[in-house]
Image (cartoon, helix red, strand yellow):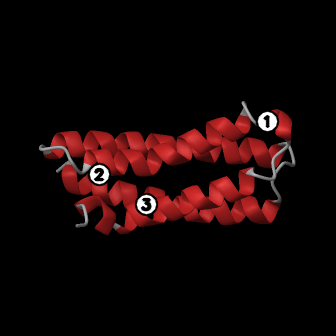
Amino acid sequence: MQFYFEKLEVWQNSRSFVKDIYTITSSFPSEEKFGLISQIRRASLSISANIAEGMTRKTEKDKARFISISFGSAIEVVNFLILANDLSIISDKDYTDLREKLEKITNQLNSLHNKFNK
């Protein structure tokens, strides 16, 4: 059995993005374990989790609210990526690659939000 959210491309992309974040943060300095690593992982997990939870809601308004929360988490990740790049913890290339993936996800979230928030 497959749940509806698993069929959504935006959820699939956010799931893949979490793997990318875990891979990149595994090379962060150990002193960031309870700082930047924890925060960026938590926020990236929240993107896919809120998509999944939102799709279980009965009303379009509730679905839109969870998609909005997911979008907020994506923007939080953008903030952490900017800071990690500013601190030279991630390379410009990794930063650009992750930003491009997040841009696609946020565009998809906007489309999904607009669908539910007519």
In-front residue for pair 29/90: 29
Local packing at callout 2 (Cα closer than 10 Å; few below 14, some 14-19, many 20+) is many
Asked which quadrant contains residue 94, the reply is bottom right
How far apart are the two marked residues, 2 and 1, measured between alpha carbons? 34 Å
Percent of width and height locating residue 79: 64, 41
Q: Are marks 3 and 2 in contact (CB under 8 Å)?
A: no
Q: Secondary structure at mark 1?
A: helix
Location of mark 1 (residue): 32
Q: Nearer the viewer, mark 2 or mark 1?
A: 1
Dot 2 falls on a residue whose secondary structure is helix
Which residue is labeled 2 in the image?
113
Q: Residues within 10 Å of mark 3 (few under 14, many from 20)?
A: few
Q: Is residue 109 visible?
A: yes
Q: Does label 3 or label 2 sit earlier along the sequence?
A: 3
Numbered badge on residue 107: 3
- Label 3: state its secondary structure: helix
Check contact, mark 2 vs mark 1: CB within 8 A. Answer: no
- Residue 82 left/right relative to 16: right
Which residue is painted at 45% across and 48% down in the image? 47
Percent x, y for residue 53?
30, 45
Q: Is residue 75 visible?
A: no
Amino acid on which disc 3 is placed: Asn
Instruction: Please state which of residues 73 and 30 is positioned toward the viewer in this rendering.
Output: 30
Residue at (32%, 51%) from the top-left corner? Answer: 52
Q: Give the residue displayed 42% in from the left and 66% down from the top.
A: 12
Say what amino acid the circle numbered 1 marks: Glu
